Amino acid sequence: MSTEFRPDFGRTAEDYTRHRAGFPPQVVERLEGTGVAVRGRDVLDVGTGTGSLGRLFALAGARVTGVDPAAPLLEQARELDREAGVTTTYEEATAEDTPFADASFDVVSAGQCWHWFDAPRAAAETWRLLRPGGHVVIAHFDWLPLPGNVVDATERLITAYNPDWTMGGGTGLYPRWLTDLATAGFGGIETFSFDIEVPYTPQAWTGRIRASAGVGASLTPERVEEFSAELEGILRDRFPGDDLRVPHRTWAVIATKPA
């Protein structure tokens, strides 16, 4: 990821918590189908943010540790854990440099964040942290811009306000991550994906976009307010009603550290 565009998600912690849809529970089921069971396992979730992916694993019976460099997000993660009735250990750290001993974990996961990492260093650290036979899981849960839909209109507005944001037009698929893992020595590489619609009210969608890299994490507060007002106008005029159905794609790659 370019060093010219480095969002600070700590600035969006409240919107991030309230409005960003978490990973769907089907992720755990799909992982189990590939042989990656998390119940009773030690899981490290890097770039954990508010703990969306790690919380799914904790609810499924894993012992979860989460790391993230943004302390405000970790505070939100702890509150969400309390509401969900799970306990996760959190540390302020990056995916490339963690404080844990070699071979400490059965699974290392990265949800919606691998693109922010120095991939060779993050993959090497993942290798160090995994026990032989352990698994790495890189997962994404992305909105899908289709011609003329609400995501397409939203991405056009983000680009108008923030030309440095170049993450629009995505397909929710990340073949480069397979190369990152293979280069680092991981084997047994496979992927899965599935699409779902996520319901949003116009207010919730506006909050969701404020919590994105191109808006709340990188624009000034004044520009964020201007953006929000203009997006609300677009939603009112072009996508009326209180039930926006936003298409999303869940995608994951799984790989194994040889035993």
Image (cartoon, rainbow, N blue to C red):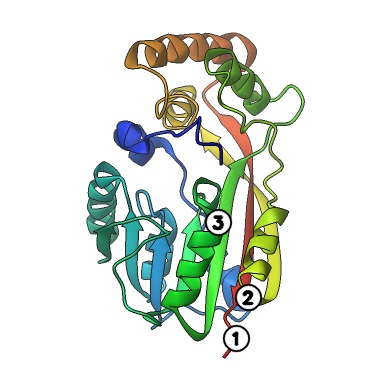
Where residue 208 appears, x then y in whole percent? Answer: 45, 31
Q: Nearer the viewer, residue 29 or 118?
A: 118
Relative image position of residue 130 (x, y in whole percent): 46, 78
Q: Secondary structure at mark 2?
A: loop
| Residue type marked 3 | Ala
Label 1 crowd (10 A; few <14 / some 14-19 / many >=20): some
**Which is nearer the N-term, disc 2 or disc 1?**
2
Task: Tell me the tag on residue 173.
Answer: none
Does 14 sit left or right of 207 as displayed? left
- The 10 Å Cα crowd at callout 2, few under 14, some 14 to 19, many 20 or more, is some
Q: Gap between marks 3 and 1, in whole Å? A: 20 Å
- Front residue of 61/131: it is 131
User: Can the viewer see residue 240 in this picture?
Assistant: no
Q: Is residue 51 visible?
A: yes
Does 43 appear above or below 121?
below
Check residue 258 in the rendering and tell me which mark sits there, or answer none: 1
Residue 207 falls in image quadrant: top left
Residue sitting at x 43%, y 23%: 203
